[in-house]
Image: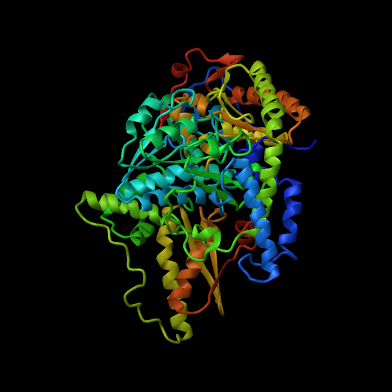
Amino acid sequence: MSPIYLDNNATTRCDPAVVEAMLPYFTEQFGNPSSMHSFGNRVGLAIKKARMQVQALLGAEQDSEIVFTSCGTESDSTAILSALKAQPERRELITTTVEHPAILSLCQHLEKDGYRVHYLAVDGKGRLDLDAYRRLLSERVAIVSAMWANNESGTLFPVEAMAQMAHEAGVMFHTDAVQAVGKVPIDMAANRIDLLSLSGHKLHAPKGIGVLYVRRGTRFRPLLRGGHQERGRRAGTENTASIVGLGVAAELALTHMEHENTVVRELRDRLEAGILARVPHAFATGDTANRLPNTSNIAFEYVEGEAILLLLNKLGIAGSSGSACTSGSLEPSHVMRAMGIPYTAAHGTVRFSLSRSNTAEEIDRVIEAVPPVIAQLRKLSPYWSGDGPVTEPDKAFAPVYA
Amino acid sequence: MWDYTEKVKDHFFNPRNAGSLDNASAVGEVGSISCGDALRLMLKVDPETETILDASFQTFGCGSAIASSSALTEIIKGKTLDEALKVSNQDIADFLDGLPPEKMHCSVMGREALQAAVANYRGETWRDDHEEGALVCKCFAIDATLIEDTVRANGLSTVQDVVNFTKAGGGCSSCHEGIEEILAKVMAERGEQFRPAPVAPAKAAPKPGKLNNLERIRRIEQVIESVRPTLQRDHGDLELIDVDGKTVYVSMTGACAGCQMESVTLAGIQQKLVEELNEMIRVVPTRAGDYARACGV
């Protein structure tokens, strides 16, 4: 049986049309777009086209607002460090507790340099308190950075409203939209977001290409200085093949936007409902009424995520987990902890993230495969007995933690 | 995904002795703070001989936690309690042909469950004797608490000190930033300021000129002797077997034999020899095949 890939929030398969469009830029179209001759000129035109394709996906007013970078992380770092460099008198930042490490690690590092970072908390469904946010906005704040969609739970933040509030307070606003771009419609011309990060490999373009959207008029300081590439805002010879690939991927994402929000959403709902109907003591995490159409994060109580993934992997099913043991750092998911999910459930969270290439047959296979896997692991669990959790699990099993 | 051995996979997919044990005469329940895993070990002990007649486990944890639990029960069945208490976490890891360094704490949890169960049988209370912190050095699985305690107890002040005392940072060196932070914190407590070593050593010790054969062998012996205490702390050892031109043959014994970090250890020794002798040296373990396996070939 062919394997089923449900880990599209981690990365996606390059669309064959993307690969095809890229190939000439490794061979005959090898020119440096900065060169005067026609070898370079043709490549320069291809980049211009890609920039316009990304512009269309973001609904940006100007194609000059699109800056190609090497990845989402570079875009995030560039945005935040630019805001700090451009406004040296502002020594505070606002972000959220559930950001991607690309933001959180940078913020923790900035704290060591004397910056003050405010981390907005989330409630049990992963939602922000906008009143608390409003109170933090001041002229001391250099930039707000809040993700458009959470990578683990798929929960959407009201970034457009938050950007408006920041704008009214005279504070720059950045959003890490790596998970949102290509999955939910975005119209930058209609909002007040100053800076936005996206990553190619999350929308069927290759790895190693990203974009930082910089609204026209936003004070900007480059991270990489050197040549005049990207109008001097990101020096370094362009990754031409990947830029061309991202352009095609952006166009495809726009074409499939409705499909993503109808067909993919239905498949996701069917998967989630199917699993929850068959597996007791399991629940979906996050703001389930307001999340990405492709993401379902299910907490299976009393079992551990890595063990679930290993057994699913044996059946050819690929997902991911917020459990401590699947992360290189051995830290349990900060997103699940921030939402206050109990340890015995947070440990067993599994994220299924779909894409436009998944089919109903695949989803039905997963719905059939998951219940026995959970049952098998629960048989091993000290919190489980027979058909249900032991009575008063916390008292029946109280290990000495070391 | 983790690089689990076939043995780990086998014990995860087909765990031995899983489930609860009726009329268990000893029960140990422990958990690991660092990852949240927890384990209940149940034993049936012959009261006359203190022999473990049967053992079973229930584990809330990842693949290697389940495999470690399964391995533990297999190892201790038939042993007396005193014999079983001699089982180290390294024995559990060895039984599974090794665990990724990040997952060594799973085997530690197994050993602790065993100690807790024996204490339970003997009517004693088991208390954990070490605290686990965030993993800093991934090459040698050394956590922040251990580094902090060692820096404090020995008044250490350089990264090299930390490498010498704990081995942390002696592998790939990518955790040196983290070690510097710990040094800065602990040194601040004792009113000192952490000063990083200068980028280029002020004046490198004069390198030896041309050594004669005897001098050269002695120098090699000195280097080998200097690393042995570090290895012995981890219940391993190293022996110089032969020197043939630019190739130095060594034999790794104890916990070092077949250790997943063997290639890192050897590379470190090789680097030391190259620096000491000022010539290219190749360090080769004599048990053919081991090095190749450590390199994943």
Image quarter where the N terminus of chain B lies is: top right
Residue B207 higher or lower than A117, as above or below = below
- A180 up-or-down from B239: above or below: above
Q: Residue at x 67, y 59 (%)?
A: A45
Left or right: residue B152 versus residue A376 is left
Residue B273 on image: x %, y %: 47, 72
In this rendering, does residue A220 appear at all? yes
**Foreground residue, A164 or A288?**
A164
What's the residue at 68%, 62% (across, down)? Answer: A43
Q: Is residue A241 left or right of residue A72?
A: right
Q: Which residue lies furthest to the left in this view?
A: B191
> Which is nearer the eye, A261 or A375?
A261
Foreground residue, A324 or B69? A324
Is residue A177 shown left or right of residue A258? left
| Picture coordinates of residue A224, whole percent (x, y) | 47, 60
Q: Nearer the viewer, residue A80 or B46?
A: A80
Q: Where is residue B176 in the image (x, y as percent from the top left)?
A: 40, 57
Give x and y (percent) for residue B224: 45, 68
Looking at the rendered image, the quarter that the C terminus of chain B falls into is bottom right
The answer to whether any part of residue B47 appears in the image is no
